[in-house]
Image (cartoon, rainbow, N blue to C red):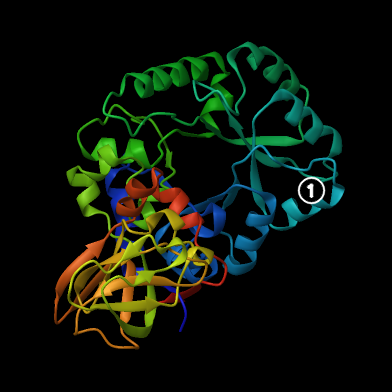
Amino acid sequence: MRCQLTLSPEALATNLALAREWAPAGARVRAMVKADAYGHGLEELISVFAEHADELGVATLDEGLQARSWLGGDMPVFVMSGDKDWDDPDAFRALRQARLVPAISSIDELRLLLDRDPGPSPLPIELKLDTGMGRLGIQERDLEALLSVLGVSTRVRVAGILTHLAAADEPDLASALAQEACFRRLLAILPEALVQGAAIHSCNSGALMQRSLGHTDLGAGTQVVRPGVMLYGAAPSAHLQATSAGARLRQVGRLVARVIEVRVLKTGQAVGYGGTWKVESERPATVAVLGAGYADGCRRSLGNRARVLIRGGSFPIIGRVSMDLISVLVDDHIRVGDEAVLLGDQQGELGSDTIPAWEWASLCGTIPYEIWTGLGSRVARVLET
């Protein structure tokens, strides 16, 4: 076995249950599974989502088609990104055949859709409103034009109206609350019949976790919640990770490798490219070599900084992480064939410990999203049995 991501259905189900617990009563849970379930492997986890979520959210048409092929059935799948190829007639046919619901982010996109969609029946869509994120979304100045276009068309049906909160994971919620107020104001401008017939939603992982901490004014009227990173066991910010809500999340994936060699180095001998680590003690050093590297998503910058778990004990990575190998300073307990945990938990004769995704993220100056989506294609995704 080379590097492997072992996936826990129980952990994922627990996190989905937390999303439902923290959501407003009766809200549907739209599990965000874009980027191959945030790098974890959607095909492997699809049955868990099918059982515990109400609907799925993806970023692109191709992701939606793939999700539908694995999912089957009638669970709604929503395409959330603005990157859609409406110039391709095949895209419309595929969208309709797979029963995918696209989010429309601009008047131009809506007009193009109406001009190119060959379908005989009204296409269900969602309208994305920009309340402060500043990337995608219909702006307030375009609402009149939006209503004008919608008013003369019977070829679309507005199934949802949404916005995306830019800073719901921050300690200061002023920005998020301002976006919520803006969202409510824009909804009030729209015709009552349009709003009543649509699912209204704004709650992402950050907003859900804030709600669990008592900030229930965030997303109070939402009818759908959109948990993403929290489903896989990490909060969207270090601030929320350190809260009671963060403590309840369970990491879904355990990134493991095997010890492929154990060697003894003498005083002065170096390890890895550039010799950035050397044996400085008078006693020999025992070094375990793991079958994993930056081609698997184990960042090069983790060299001489991060740690791994072997037999439940914590051991430092030494030298530079290379494309295929990692060296670890160990003791006499470690043997060839031992499991080394790079991310996740382990119990063994040397103890019990956990390496959360936020530990790597902090060392690399990034966030767990990037850590997980950066796991390499040769890392096997394997469901726990």
Question: Mark 1 belongs to which amino acid?
Answer: Phe
Q: In this view, does 342 lie to the left or right of 376?
A: left
The percent position of residue 189, horizontal first and vertical second, equals 54, 13
The percent position of residue 312, horizontal first and vertical second, equals 19, 75
Instruction: Give me the residue at 80% from left, 53% from top.
Output: 93
Quadrant including the C terminus: bottom left
Instruction: Give me the residue at 60% from left, 18% from top.
Output: 139
**Residue 294 visible at all:** yes
Residue at the disc numbered 1: 92
Instruction: Give me the residue at 24% from left, 84% from top.
Output: 334
The percent position of residue 282, horizontal first and vertical second, equals 17, 73
Q: In this view, does 381 lie to the left or right of 73?
A: left
From the viewer's side, name the closer residue of 344 and 270.
Answer: 270
Instruction: Examine the rendered structure and indicate whether residue 180 appears above or below residue 48.
Output: above
The percent position of residue 355, horizontal first and vertical second, equals 27, 61
**Residue 7 visible at all:** no
From the viewer's side, name the closer residue of 164 and 23.
Answer: 164
Disc 1 residue crowd, few under 14, some 14–19, many 20+, Cα 10 Å: many
- Which image quadrant is residue 117 in? top right
